[in-house]
Structures are given as structure tokens and as C-alpha cells.
Image (spheres, rainbow, N blue to C red):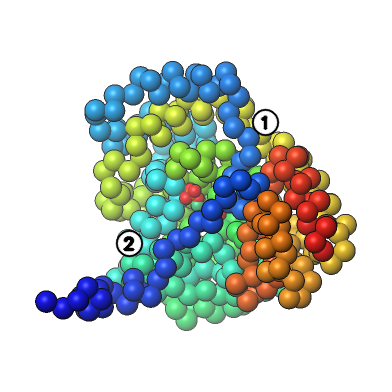
Amino acid sequence: MPDIDTLLRRYLRAQVLAGTAYHVPDSEGLIKLDAMENPYTLPAELRRAWLEALAEVDLNRYPDPQARALSVALRARLGLSADTGLLLGNGSDELIQLLSIAFAGSGKPALAPAPSFVMYKVLAEAVGLDFIGVPLGADFALDRDAMLDAIARHEPGLIYLAYPNNPTGNLFDDETMHAILRAAPGVVVIDEAYSAFSSKSFLPILSRYDNLLLMRTLSKQGLAGLRLGLLMGAPAWIEQLDKLRLPYNINSLTQVSAVCLLRHQDVLDAQVRAILEERDRLFRALTRLPGVMAYPSEANFISFRVGAGRGDALFQALREDGILIKNLGANTALSDCLRVTVGTPEENAAFLQVLEKHL
Ligand SMILES: *Cc1c(COP(=O)(O)O)cnc(C)c1O
């Protein structure tokens, strides 16, 4: 009988053996400004209404496989027409995984600008779908020529555009986005994970392109724990992807919670407004700090660059003083870049104070 290492090497794909599990840093006891979470919890009254809705759930039964009540609520909320397809995922991460599975084996790669959301590459390669990253240009703008050249050369079946982009926070140029939509041989997924904080969206013109899928999530606007993502677009695409979805991917508690909380959207909207005000304040404060270059953001985080060679040390110093942010420096295009999620006024003040002390 061969030993277990021999068996692993014999039967697992090289991508699996070479990969690493998604690492979430321990945040216990720290001010958590690393993961684009909304810092506010639900007000007590809404929390009670939500718990009452949850108490009605029959956990002995499987969830509604089509999540019908939730789909109706989401369609109404987004103003989706009946001829727009809607697919729900266990977070948009699951939708990215589903897209990866659907396009793997086609012989054509997935493509996205780089740096962008890491899961596009991770989940593509996990299922043997090649991934092409096209470097962003100056100020993290799309490099129009490089994108169009790469699309012509690689003929990607799947293109991701995060709008606004994570981890850079900016929106891409409209005309370049449209040029990519026209040039794409397959589908273009515009990932609007930060739509609640952004001044622009492609939702109003979704039906203009047959090859456009729009992805959103409830995570960044206050419901990260629910795990609920949305993919919208032409029903022909959505129907194919739906074949690959696990039957009960949206659990009963998530379905009931989301329906209940969408009825109280005003609470989440007020939280978003508070975060937007804080984003502006935080941006102005970062810009005033010597040696800090903050990048304008249309999301609920701000990425900033510090002095050459200082990024890792600053990240560590902040953590030792109780503030957890994200170190982006492992990516060469983001050397000495750090990313802070917009927190409460108190959390942001604590972050700024500690940062200033260590600069
Ligand atoms: C956070 C994020 C996601 C994932 O969101 P979930 O719905 O929580 O899985 C997707 N895309 C981008 C660009 C993100 O920043």
C-alpha cells in the first residue's frame, strides 16, 4: 500500500496540490477593517422582527429550491423586468465558481484586468479553466489597447470586470467598458459588489447587451453573514448556468432573512449613507497625512500607498496596535499598498490615530 503522500500526488490535479486554502486572518480583539463589512448591526427593533420571521422556518424541510419569495422581492427591489434572468448564489463567490465550472473545458480562458478580485483567478484555476490577467494602466484605469489585444488573442469565453474594482476602488472608463462588451467573443460579467456605494451602474442598460451578465451581492451593504449573491442577464445564459447550481444552494434561513430585511431596506440605506460620509472624511484625512497616497474610491474601502518599503512594517504595526486592515503588497503592482474598510467614526478615528503614530 503506497503512503498517503504518494496517493495524493498520483490522483489529485497539480492545481489542487499547488494551491493553498483561502486564508482569513484571525481578527479576535482587533478593530476589523479588512473585509469590506458594514460596521453597523441591525437596530434592536428590526432584530426582533427578523427573529420572529426566522422562528417560522420549518428546518425539517428543504428550502424552496427556486427561492421564489426572495426572487420576487429582489426583482421588485431592483426593478428587473420579467424578461431578465436572475440566478441566486451562496454569495457571489458561488456564482463565480458556477461560471468557472460552466466555461471550463471549452478550451477558451477566462480573462480579467489585474489587479482585481482574486477569486476570478482562484476559482477558474480550481476547475482547470485557464485565466489571463491583463495589467491595469496608470491610476488603475483599464488599459484599453492591452485589453482589446488580449481579447483578440485569447478569445476568452468569460471576462470579469469589477465595477468598482476591488482592490483599487475605482470605476473603469465607460467607453472602454462598452468597447470590451462589443469585442468580447463570449460573456462579460460586470461585478457590482459595491453598487450600494457607487455613483454608477450598468443595471439600467443591462438589456442592451445579450452577452452582459451583472453580478451583485448583499455582503458589502450589511448582510455578509447571509451569503447571498445575484447574477442577472439574458435568460438563455441564466438557464444554462442554473443547470449547474446545487438544488438548495440558498438555505431557508437566508431566504427568510433576506425577504424580511429587504422590507426594511431603509435601515440598510441609512447605514450606507453613514458609510459614504465616513468614506469622504477618511479619504480627506488620509490625503493630509505625509507620505500617504490615497486612491479615490467608489466603494466602502480606500486603498492607499505608503513610502517605498514601508507597507509590510506599517501593516504589522497597525495590527500590533489593534487595527486589522489588508496588506496588498504581495501583488507587485500594489507594492506598499494597504486597504482599509470604512468603519464607524470611532473605528476610523482609531485607525487614523495609530497610522499617524507609525508613519
Ligand atoms: C467581496 C466581493 C465579492 C464576493 O462577495 P460575496 O457575495 O460575499 O461572495 C465579489 N466580487 C467582488 C469584487 C468583491 O469585492
Residue indicated by mark 1 = 270
Task: Give above or below for 37 relative to 53.
Answer: below
The part of the image, by quadrant, that contains residue 305 is bottom right
137 left or right, relative to 350? left
**Closest to the observer, 133 or 32:** 32
Quadrant in which residue 321 is drawn: bottom right
Q: Nearer the viewer, residue 316 or 264?
A: 316
Relative image position of residue 27 (x, y in whole percent): 57, 50
Amino acid carrying label 2: it is Ile
- Which quadrant: the N terminus? bottom left
Asked whether the beta carbons under mark 1 and mark 2 sit within 8 Å of each other, the answer is no
The residue that appears at 50% across and 56% down in the rendered structure is: 24
- Check the image and report above or below for 13 versus 70: below
Which residue is label 2 attached to? 101
For residue 130, which quarter of the picture?
Answer: bottom left
> Residue 151: x and y, percent?
49, 75
Q: At 63% across and 48% down in the image, what residue appears?
A: 30
Q: Give the residue displayed 24% in from the left and 28% down from the top.
A: 60
Gap between marks 1 and 2, in whole Å? Answer: 38 Å
Front residue of 265/319: it is 319
Secondary structure under badge 1? helix
**Which numbered disc, 1 or 2, marks the residue that appears first in the sequence?**
2
- What amino acid is at disc 1? Ala
Q: Residue at x 44, y 29 (%)?
A: 257
Judge: label 1 CB < 8 Å from ligand 1: no
Local crowd at mark 1 within 10 Å, few (<14), some, or many (≥20)? few
Q: How many marks?
A: 2
Residue 318 pos. (x, y %): 71, 57
